[in-house]
Image: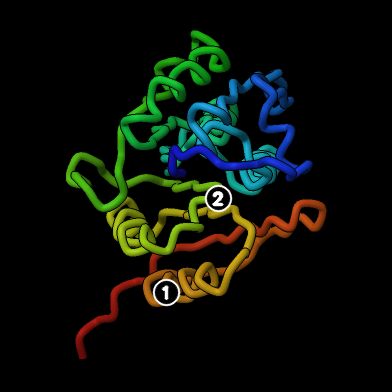
Amino acid sequence: MALVPYDDSGVPGLKRFHDSLATYNFASHTIRIRQDWKQLGVAAVVWDAAVVLCMYLEAGGIDLRERSVIELGAGTGLVGIVAALLGANVTITDREVALEFLKANVRDNVPSDLHDKVSIRPLTWGRSLENFSTFDLIVGADIIYLEETFPDLLQTILHLSLEHTVILLSCRIRYQRDQNFLSTMKGHFTLAEVHYDSSTDVHIFKAQKKAPKEDL
């Protein structure tokens, strides 16, 4: 997510983002996520899409044990933290400017005996992708929202995935451009909605790369 301040004056639904801590219970752990809305903006708070995706993972939507997982646009790192607590080997990524904040949340919530299962790395979509290999699972919560990032996001997902890779994208569909991005993904991936949380209007889409067509 972009690290930009957001003017929330007069928007009561956003007041919860002013809390310095957001507390959740996942994978038999109490997770306390630091938030910093005023200084860091939308990437430094927990959005509903992240919570819904954590609920889906905890419910066994996919087996995470010993799987390699990468979280894109991690923000506070909640999804990556939960994936690690559920047994995955997790690479949590965001832009360089977000990493110190992200590291603090991981350090506070991942037990010391699991530290070797988590790495935190800078990743700007579309750049220096040669530094990353492929993964069993790619996760992203509310990363489909800035149209200018869509080509780089798609390029990044393509680079990180093989045919067996599962991609889980959790988001609200706010604009037609969001649907357009999902339609573009269908040119490269099979794509299906696997969960909808009506209380938050959050969708989870599952994608897998299509097999290359054989030459006749």
Decide: is 205 above or below 124.
below
Q: Is residue 100 left or right of residue 174?
A: left
- Secondary structure at badge 2 equals loop
Q: Amino acid at mark 2?
A: Asp
Is tag 2's residue or tag 1's residue first in the polypeptide sequence?
A: 2
- Circle count: 2
Question: Is disc 2 in contact with disc 1, using a CB cutoff of under 8 Å?
Answer: no
Residue 29 percent coordinates (x, y): 69, 19
Q: Is residue 184 left or right of residue 191?
A: left
Q: Relative to the observer, which residue lies in front, 122 or 26?
A: 122
> Mark 2, residues whose alpha carbon is within 10 Å: few (<14), some, or many (≥20)?
many
Give residue 100's quadrant in the image: top left
> Mark 1, residues whose alpha carbon is within 10 Å: few (<14), some, or many (≥20)?
some
Residue 12 percent coordinates (x, y): 78, 41
Location of mark 2 (residue)? 142
Q: Residue at x 65, y 20 (%)?
A: 20
Give residue 212's quadrant in the image: bottom left
Residue 136 percent coordinates (x, y): 41, 46
Q: Residue at x 49, y 14 (%)?
A: 107
Location of mark 1 (residue)? 184
Q: Amino acid at mark 1?
A: Thr
Residue 13 percent coordinates (x, y): 76, 43
Q: Relative to the observer, which residue lies in front, 82 or 141?
A: 141
Decide: is 112 above or below 122.
above
Q: Is residue 133 left or right of residue 23?
A: left
Q: Residue at x 80, y 58 (%)?
A: 198
- Outermost residue to the bottom: 216
Q: Relative to the observer, which residue lies in front, 198 or 213?
A: 198
- Secondary structure at badge 1 equals helix
- Outermost residue to the top: 112
Q: Is residue 51 left or right of residue 118?
A: right
Q: Residue at x 25, y 41 (%)?
A: 132
